[in-house]
Structure formats: structure tokens, C-alpha cells
Image (tube, helix red, strand yellow):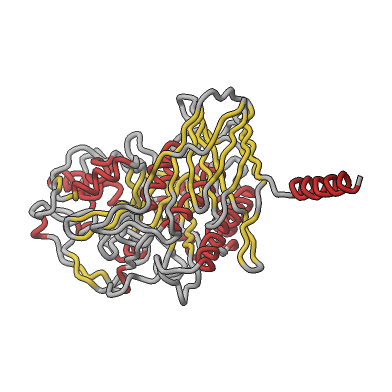
Amino acid sequence: MKRYFIICLVLFFALNVFAQRPINKLVVRADSAEQKISKFIYGHFAEHLGRCIYGGIWVGRNSKIPNIRGYRKDVLTALKAIHVPVIRWPGGCFADTYHWKEGIGPYSKRPRIVNTTWGGVVEDNSFGTHEFLEFCELLGAEPYISVNVGSGTVREASEWVEYVNSTYDIPMVKLRHKNGRLKPWNVKFWGIGNETWGCGGIMSADYYANVLSRYSFFMKNYGETKLYKIASSGLPEDFNWTEIIMKKWKNTDTWLQDYMSGYSLHYYTVIDWNKKGSAINFTEKEWFIILQKALYLDELIKKHSEIMDRYDPEKRIGLVVDEWGTWYDVEPGVNPAFLYQQNSLRDAIVAAISLNIFNNHCDRVKMANLAQLVNVLQSVIITKDEQIVLTPTYYVFKMFSVHQDATLLPTKLECEEYSYGEEKIKSLNVSASRDKDGKIHISIVNLDPNNVKELECKILGSNVEKGSAEIITAERMNAFNDFGKTEEVNIKPFEKFKLEDDRLIVSLPPKSIVMFELE
């Protein structure tokens, strides 16, 4: 009898502990798909900064580095593989010192300029409007041009649109023909200033609201190309700036409201602006803080969207997160103004979290542009002379490209928390979509660097018969890819899952990103 009592007592405690154990559950609503995930959410940003343009994208036609009409062949090949949909150029802060007419025509006649924004280096102006737009054509990407409202003029902005889009018999079109381009490029996306609260002119929101409408009004549509004009926002938490810009737009006569199509938001994932820390030498505490900061982007988007919804319930104005990514101290021995940093598994996790957030807010978020494309901040590519490295972030963009122009599937996630000290965040992060062929893709991130997460995923409204998966992870949380070494972080097949009726049962490794494809 005593032995029987002891066995029952052990079973009771065992069952009680099991019942209290947190269970990770995900529901994917394949029966409630409505919103489209714009492919432009997977956009990029290329500024005249450090080695992004010169040496990263452009080496010139006479370079010993293999190139196609001056563009690095290896970079073009790599970018085509991730289906880059849009690229923002020429800045950034550089945009408000850039005068586009100095960057067209024969190279020998283009004036050399000093990049006063980023390091005071001298540029030969060999990469200008024609070069940028041809680069986009080679990639099949849409160009996004930021005009100079800081030191430029309304006429300068207006004539830039004429030069690239018009077919009329007017001076700007004749100049384009003279410079070797007969057909217009039909550029749709235009930014009206950049960070006008700071490097774009130290403006107030009220002052900028008038600058925005004035510049935008005189930038005209030509042919069938209707311009998508993107307003500059304030600092990430300047909700009053958003209120002022949206209120002015709402109070403008309806027939004039097309002076604004999108509203910019910039957000960098930074531990501390005064002490950013190393990109590759960091502790778990710094891992946790960076991921915590990355998740804050979701709250920012919600708060700005709430303001926009009050003035624009039809969601005519898109939220454009045209600068985002991690920011650390530059690598040792590098010009501090070049913002060159390495890229680790931690950055891949941040990229996956951010893209999931954008996907889940695709009703309002219509574009996002990672900062930056090559050799600067959270780049997808790093180059050195003739060598090239594909970063962990690159592989996230390659993996997540299946979400481009797919239909968002609503999700409900219940999961354990990942804690460090007294702080806690959700250990899992997710988004899901269905592509034009009916395939379901679920991207899941395990933020916990130490523990496997057992997850049960239920698919509603779809009979799933087969599935496959890929994973991005590494042994070390600070693993990175470097020149002359075997890649530590890339995409590999993943098989630790099974399908049971309408359920997906999966064991998610620590510090991992997994993409499921279900049919």
C-alpha cells in the first residue's frame, strides 16, 4: 500500500510539472488571407558612403575587377539571386548635398566633389543618375531617388524628374538624349528630403510640411508614370511630426492630396548611441539587448500607424521604413565615417525579426530599405578588392524572398519567454504567407541562443500534404562569414519536423531561423 501511494505521488507531481510546462503553439489562418505583402518591403539602400558605391557597386569600366560596364559582376550576380525589388539612392544625408547635374555627361567633364557628410573624401562623380538607373535595370529593380531639399531647389528637383521621365521636346529631355539615353526611365519612387529634422536641413515639422508640399507639387507626372512621393519623418519616436504631416495632408483639397503617397520612418537597432559595441565580439547580454531593440520596431510601427489611421483610414499613404538595420562601432583601423562593420548570426536574427514585422504590418508598410547594400552598416555583401563575402543577412533575404508579393496569412502565437536578468522577450517570432502557386511559407525565428523550442503549428483552411524546410543557424551566436574562410552562416536543409494531419510539429534549434514550405 505504501509503495502504491509513493508511485501515485510521483506520478501526480510529474503530471503537474508537465501540465505547467510552457507550450509553444502557433495557429496559421490560411482561411483568412487578405493583405498582400509588397515585394518592396524587401528593398535596399545605397548611399555615397564609405565603400558602398565606389568599390562596392562601381569599379569603373577599366578596373581589373571583373565588371559589366563598370559594375562589379560578382555583386550583380549575388543581388540577382535575392531578387532585389527596389534600391534607394543617393542618400541618406548625402542626398541633401548632392546636385544631380554634376553627375551626368562625359566623365572627363564631371566636377570632382567632396563628400562633406561622410569623411570628407573626394569623389570623381563617375557614378551618377545614368549609372544608378542602369544598375537598377541590370538587376530588374525599381529605382527610388531622394531629392535634395536641404541645399537644392524646387527647380532642380522638378528638372530631375523631367530628365529621367519626360518625352517632351524640352531642354531636359534633349540633354538626356545628348548624354546617350533616348527612352525615359519612368522612375516612380521619389523621396522629398531625408531626415529633414537633422542632416536634411534642421527643420521643424511645420516648416517641413510646407517644403514637402511645395517641392512635391512641382514634381510632375509624365506619361503613364504616376510619382509615388515619400515624405521625410521626424526621429523614430517623434509622433507629433507624424501628426503634423498627416493633418496637413488631410486638410489639403482632395485633388491636391497626391503630393504625398508615402511617409518615411527610420529606425536603427543600436545598443547605445554613445557606445554601440562590436559587431562580432559581444556577450549574451548584448545579444539580448539588440534583439529587444529589434522587437521595438513593431511598437513603433503600431504607434505611427495609429496616427496615420486617424487621418487616412483607407490607408492611401504607405509607411516606408526606408532606413533600418543594426549599427555598431566600425571595425578597427577603418575610417570612422565609413560605417564599415562585420555581420554575424545576430544580424541575421535581427533581419528575420524585422522582415517578419514588416510582413505582419503589410496593410500599412509598403516599402522598407535595409541600410545598406554593400560594405556599410548591416550590408548583405562585403567586398575587398576582387573578393566578396555574402553576409548572414544576405542569406535571410534570400530565404525570405518567397514572401515577396505573397498574401499574408494571419498568425496567432503563444510561446515561452526568453529572459536575461530581469528582462523578458518572446522567444519566438513569426510571419506566414501564401504565394501565387498556393504554397504556404512560414518563417519562424528562435531568439533564444541556448534552448530548443518545441512548437506545434496548426494550419487552418488548408489541407497540407507535404512540406520542406531550410534553416539558418551556427554553433556560435557571433559566427560570421569572412574573406578566405569557409562560410559559417548560410542556408541549409532542415528536417527536424513532421506533419500530422493539419499540424506541423517542429523542434526549433537555439538561435535559428527556419523557413517552411507547405503544399
- In the image, is residue 244 above or below residue 25? below
- In the image, is residue 347 above or below residue 517? below
Q: Is residue 316 visible?
A: no
Residue at left offset 56%, top offset 50%: 452
Q: Nearer the viewer, residue 173 or 192?
A: 192
Give the farthest residue toward the right. Answer: 1
Q: Is residue 123 visible?
A: yes
Percent x, y of residue 217: 42, 50
Give the farthest residue toward the bottom. Answer: 274
- Give the mark count: 0
Residue at left offset 28%, top offset 57%: 382
Task: Point out the image quarter for the N terminus.
Answer: top right
Residue at left offset 40%, top offset 46%: 397
Q: Nearer the viewer, residue 378 or 174?
A: 378
Q: Nearer the viewer, residue 22 or 320?
A: 22
Percent x, y of residue 474: 42, 53
Residue at left offset 49%, top offset 43%: 514
Percent x, y of residue 438: 49, 25
- In the image, is residue 290 above or below residue 216? below
